[in-house]
Amino acid sequence: MSTLVIAEHDNASLKGTTLNAVAAAQALGADIDILVAGGSCDGAAQAAAAVPGIGKVLVADNAAYEHQLAENISLLVAEVGAAYDNIVAPATANCKNFMPRVAALLDVAQISDITAVDSADTFERPIYAGNVIATVQSADAKKVITVRTTAFDAVASEGGSATVEACGAVHDAGISAFVGEEVAVSDRPELTSADVVISGGRGMQNGENFKLLEGIADKLGAAIGASRAAVDAGFVPNDMQVGQTGKIVAPDLYIAVGISGAIQHLAGMKDSKVIVAINKDEDAPIFQVADYGLVADLFDALPELESKI
Amino acid sequence: MKVLVAVKRVVDYNVKVRAKADGSDVDLNNVKMAINPFCEIGVEEAVRLKEAGTASEVIAVSVGDKSCQEQIRTALALGADRGIQVETDGNVEPLVVAKLLKGVVDKEEPALVILGKQSIDGDNNQTGQMLAALAGMGQGTFASEVAIDGDKVKVTREVDGGLQTVSLNLPAVVTTDLRLNEPRYASLPNIMKAKKKPLDVYTPEDLGVTVTTHLTQLKVKPPAERQAGIKVESVDELVDKLKNEAKVIS
Ligand SMILES: Cc1cc2nc3c(=O)[nH]c(=O)nc-3n(C[C@H](O)[C@H](O)[C@H](O)COP(=O)(O)OP(=O)(O)OC[C@H]3O[C@@H](n4cnc5c(N)ncnc54)[C@H](O)[C@@H]3O)c2cc1C
C-alpha cells in the first residue's frame, strides 16, 4: 500500500498542517510520499524532504500551480495520485478547494475531515457540527481523504532525508486565473496550530475593542480568533472565524470572551484541552463546555487579566 | 444568462442532533427541517443577479425524495423562477449528487451554477467542487463576492489567510460562504405565488446516472463529553487555576 500526502505550503515553506496529514497517513500504515505542487516551491520541497519517514518528495514546480488554482492542481494530483492507494491532504481551505475535484476526476468518494483511522478502509469523521461522530467504510479501491488536523499530532519536521524528484505534466486547464489576494500578516502564531487561542464575540462590540485581547495574546503567545457574529459585524476579518464553518482549533488553552457558545462555534473549539469563558450572562451555553467560567463584564475582566498574567 | 442554484433539505441549524442510543444512526424523529443555510445564501445571490438584470432565469434544483420539494418551494418563494427535483431515495452521496447535477447542467446549460459551500448535516464540503470537475468548469468556492464581468466571473474567496480573488471563464461553479449576502425572508404573497411556479421531476435514469454507494456509515456515536467545569469568582482565582491547577500558563 502507498499513500500520497499533498503538502500545504506557501512555496517558500511547508505549513504545519502537512505534518498532521502525514501523521494521519502513518495511521493508514502505508509507504508515504509527499507531493509539493507550487511555483518556485523549492523551499517547501526541501522542508518536505526533511520530514522523517517519507519515501520521496515529488515536486511539480510551475507557474500553473503557483496560486494553487483548483482547476490545475486537481488534474496534477489525479495524474500523480493514480499510482497510489490513498491520497491524503489536510482539511485546509486550500486542500478543501481542490481535493473533491480530484475525487470526482478519479470517480471515487472523498472522505472529508477524518478524525481517526480505524483501519485501512474505515474512518471516523464528525457530522452535524461535531454533535455526532460517524464511522464510515469506503468501498473505493483508491481513497481520497482530508484530515482534521487537530485530531492528529504533527510528526517531526526534521531528521528525514527523502529524495526529491520532479513529477507530473504541466496542467493548465486555462479556465481560471488568479487575480489577487488580501492576506493578513501577523506576528502571532497561526490560529490552527497555536497553543493558546483567545477569541472575541459579539460582546466585544467593535473591532477597536479587540485590542483588549491583543495585550493578553501578546503575553500568552496566543493567536486571536472570533465568532461568526464578530466577523459578520466587521469587527475582524473572516480568517479569524472559529467554528463549524470556519477554522477548527484545539489548543491547550482556549479563552472565549463575549461569545455565547452556539453549536456552530462550539464545533470549532470544544476539543481544546482547557476552555475558559468570560461572559456577563451566567446562563450562556459557553459555560457548559468551559472548565473555568468567569461571569463578568469583559471590559472589567480583560484589563485585569492582562495585568495579572 | 441562466443561473442554476442547488438547494438541500437539512435539519434546521438550531437543532442539536444526537446519535440514537443504539448507535445505528442519528435521531431525526420529529426534528425541524429547513433549507441548508449556505444554499439559502446561494438562492439569494442568484435572485440578486436576476434583479440586477444580469440573470434572465433562476432555476432551483434539489436532489432527494419528495419532501425536498418543500425546500424547492422555499427557493421559489425567495424568487427563483422554476424548480427541478431529482428524485432519489433520501440522501445520496456528494459524488452522486454532483453527477445528477451535471445531468441537469447538460440539459439546462446555465452560465452559472451556485451551491452552498457545505451542508450542515454531512459537513462534507464537496459537491460544488465535484460538479465543477465533472462539468469541466472553473470554480469559485467559499465566495464572499461574485461579480459577472462579460464572459467571466470574478469571485472573492474566503481562504485561510484572508481573501483571494480569482477570475473564471463562464460557465462556472460558485459555492457560497457566510458573508456573500444576507438572505431575505419570503413574503406571504411570494409564498403563495411559489406554489404555482413550475416544478419538474426527473429520475436519475432520465439524467443517465446510476446511483452508486461508495461510503457506508457503519455506526454513529456522541463526541467525547467534556467534564463539567467550575465557575471562578474573580480574575485572581482564574489566574491561579490556570497556573496551578490546569498548568496552562506560567
Ligand atoms: C450555517 C451557519 C454556520 C455558522 N458557522 C459558525 C461558525 O463557524 N462559527 C461561529 O462562531 N458561529 C457560526 N454560526 C453562528 C452561530 O450560530 C452564532 O450566531 C454565533 O456563534 C454567535 O456569535 P457570538 O457568540 O459572538 O454572539 P452572541 O450569540 O450574540 O453572543 C454574545 C455574547 O456576548 C456576551 N456579552 C455581551 N456583552 C458582554 C460584556 N460586556 N461582557 C461579557 N460578555 C458580554 C453576551 O452575554 C452573549 O453571550 C453559524 C451559523 C449558521 C447558521
Image: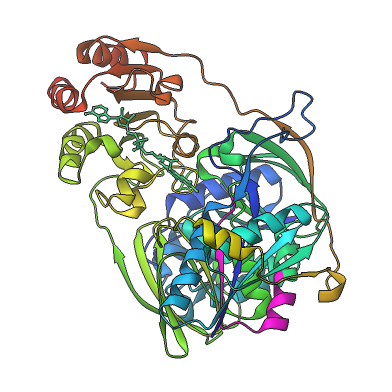
Q: Residue at x 50, y 40 (%)?
A: A150
Q: Quadrant of the N terminus of chain A?
A: bottom right
Residue B61 drawn at (x, y percent): 67, 67
| Closest to the observer, B179 or A183 | B179
Whether residue A56 is visible to the viewer of this picture, yes or no, is no
| Closest to the observer, A113 or B145 | B145
| Closest to the observer, B51 or A99 | B51
Q: Is residue B100 above or below residue B120?
A: below
Q: Is residue A212 left or right of residue A247?
A: left
Q: Residue at x 43, y 63 (%)?
A: A44
Q: Is residue B199 above or below residue A295?
A: below
Q: Is residue B91 left or right of residue A207?
A: right
Q: Residue B175 in magenta?
A: no
The quadrant in which residue B193 appears is bottom right
Whether residue A41 is visible to the viewer of this picture, yes or no, is yes
Q: Is residue A192 left or right of residue B59?
A: left
Most extreme residue toward the bottom is B150
Q: Residue at x 81, y 75 (%)?
A: B207
Residue A199 drawn at (x, y percent): 31, 37
Residue B72 drawn at (x, y percent): 65, 61
Q: Quadrant of the C terminus of chain A?
A: top left
Q: Is residue B106 above or below residue A121?
A: below
Residue A178 drawn at (x, y percent): 40, 78
Residue range of the region highlighted in magenta in the rendering: B101-119
Q: Residue B102 in magenta?
A: yes
Q: How many marks?
A: 0
- Ligand 1 is found in which quarter of the picture? top left
Q: Is residue B144 above or below residue B106?
A: above
Q: How is the image coloured?
A: rainbow
